[in-house]
Amino acid sequence: MTVRQDQLKNGFRIVSEHMPGLQSAAIGIWVTAGGRHERIEQNGIAHFLEHMAFKGSERRSALQIAEAIEDVGGYINAYTSREVTAYYARVLKDDVALAMDVIGDIVLNPVFDPREIEVERGVILQEIGQAYDTPDDVIFDWLQEQSYHDQPLGRTILGPSERVSSFSREDLSGFVAEHYGPEQMILSAAGAVDHEALMKMAEEMFGHLQPHKGLIPEAARFTGGEARQEKDLEQAHFALALESPGYRDDGIYTAQIYSTALGGGMSSRLFQEVRESRGLCYTIFAQTGAYADTGTTTIYAGTSADQVAELATITIDEMKRAAEDMSEEEVARARAQMKAGMLMGLESPSNRAERLARLVQIWGRVPSLEDTVAKIDSVSTEDVRVFAEQMAARAPAALALYGPVSGAPSLADLQERRAA
């Protein structure tokens, strides 16, 4: 399998990977315009725009967009994150050109019919309401807000309902004009694809766009803080975030191995101590997420009101213990889990196309899998212990609590325990 990468004269980027033996392909446009690219009065508009792309173009109605892909047995979808908005499809190899045509059409030619805007506004407001009814969704929004307080990166992707209620057709068009230039777009494809054919289609569809430098997002600053909301729920939800490396920092591999060993599976420390040995919860995990210039290691658990304090203090104690006695076996297991998860995921053309786009967005190129595996393998047990000590004692932290949490320790309490 060979990765190929090109760029049109106007800055539009194309990356693809042919996967021999496959009869299908994943193809999409990744636009470097997500939640962190919004001004405060625009919060939620990138997600609103993603919804509107499927509500009709200059050439197709909303129904025709869906039928064009589903008539050939494929599927089409989109998502908005804090750093990108993606529009993608999965089709059989003979229908790649069709998928490219449909995706290009919805990205370049949305009509923003006022009637459809009102319909979709209602859908998104329902989505916001549903998120607030889902504790283990809303708590991560609060945690993000406390981690990056008063910054675009800390705002919700869905946006507040009052903003969503006021967006106009002009607001949507304005965001496109600001952020949907050719230099902000990446065509990524994997599976049964031909790079030269993709290049030709990209030139025909996107080559006329004028170069347009997008707005550079505000640099991230991990601020830390606490959000706590008492509510009559069955469980107390606990989420702790600690500042970690971003994607452009090789320390990301150490951070991911650490979080896997700490709480990444059934054999992890937190799972074994908090759930298996003490029975304090059903769900507990640790994970490391990253952006271009920052990252967070997050620990989440749901437990009963009378056990949340014990769970929180044990979590800190396990973090401190990891700095002292993280073993070679644990690090080796975490490395194996990390490599297996990555390599198994890349057997899917959809996952592979997304990886290609993300790497081009972050690095401007696609590092080889061999290079990535080598960096994972190069992380030593001592590296993980040093990182664990930083997480346990010094890394800036944010805390979110939701539910019957009156007995839960504060962030200041946890900081005191970290320092002890």
Image: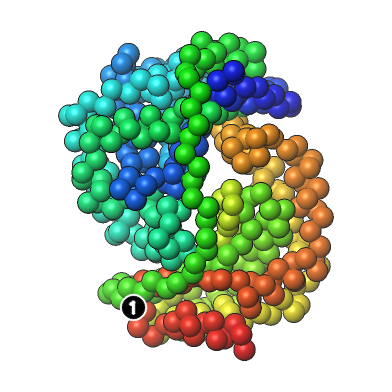
Farthest bottom residue in view: 420
Under circle 1, the secondary element is loop
* Residue visible at 31% across and 16% down in the picture: 58
* Residue visible at 48% across and 74% down in the picture: 281
Q: Which residue is mark 1?
A: 404
* Residue visible at 44% across and 30% down in the picture: 180
Residue 384 in the image, given as x and y percentages of width and height = 74, 66
Residue 43 shown left or right of residue 125 in the figure: right
The vertical placement of 212 against 315, above or below, is above
Kind of residue indicated by mark 1: Pro
Residue 31 in the image, given as x and y percentages of width and height = 48, 33
* Residue visible at 53% across and 28% down in the picture: 183
Of residues 331 and 388, the one drawn nearer to the viewer in this rendering: 388
Residue 10 shown left or right of residue 179 in the figure: right
At label 1, counting other C-alpha atoms closer than 10 Å, the crowd grade (few under 14, some 14-19, many 20 or more) is many
The vertical placement of 237 against 77, above or below, is below
Report which quarter residue 80 is drawn in: top left
* Observer able to see residue 256: no
Of residues 111 and 100, the one drawn nearer to the viewer in this rendering: 111
Report which quarter residue 299 is drawn in: bottom right
The vertical placement of 209 against 311, above or below, is above
Residue 300 in the image, given as x and y percentages of width and height = 50, 67
